[in-house]
Image (cartoon, rainbow, N blue to C red):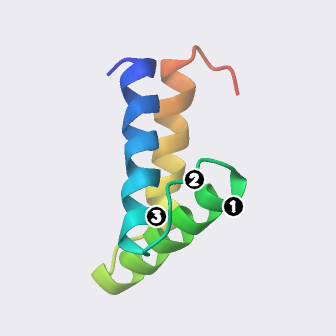
Amino acid sequence: MTQLIRIEAARAALARAAWARGQSPAYGEDAIIDLLADIRQWCAAAELDFSRCNHIAWVVYQDENGGAA
């Protein structure tokens, strides 16, 4: 997946999450924090390991960006 597609997917997820909360789309740090908290809650309810998922996402990010953080 290209970096541009991942960026657009993240932007769409932020907008959809705001819509689900009855808010206008936002793309700053507060919106990202809210979405991550939502995902943590969803993982807990679905009995998924958020920390593991987050770590694997970090590994994928590192791989896609040549190890640059």
Q: Give the alpha-carbon distance from disc 1 to disc 3, as whole Å.
A: 11 Å
Q: Where is residue 69 in the image (x, y as percent from the top left)?
A: 70, 28
Q: Which of 68 and 39 is in front in this view?
A: 39
Looking at the image, is 69 positioned above or below residue 51?
above
Q: Nearer the viewer, residue 55 or 31?
A: 31
Please identify the residue farthest to the top as the structure is shown. 66
**Which residue is disc 2 drawn over?**
26
Asked if disc 3 and disc 2 are in contact, CB closer than 8 Å, the reply is yes
Q: Position of residue 22 (x, y in %)?
A: 43, 74
Q: Give the alpha-carbon distance from disc 3 to disc 2, as whole Å.
A: 7 Å
**Which residue is disc 1 drawn over?**
30
Q: Quadrant of residue 37?
A: bottom right
Q: What residue type is labelled 3?
A: Ala
Along the horizontal axis of the image, is 50 left or right of 67?
left
Q: What residue type is labelled 2?
A: Ala
Q: Which mark is residue 60?
A: none
Please, what secondary structure does the residue beneath circle 1 have? helix
Going from N to C along the chain, the mark reached first, 3 or 2, is 3
Q: Which residue is drawn at 46% across and 30% down?
A: 7
Q: In which quarter of the image is residue 39?
A: bottom left
Q: Which amino acid does label 1 sit on?
A: Asp
Q: Give the alpha-carbon distance from disc 2 to disc 1, as whole Å.
A: 8 Å
**Which residue is disc 3 drawn over?**
18
Looking at the image, is 46 positioned above or below residue 19?
below
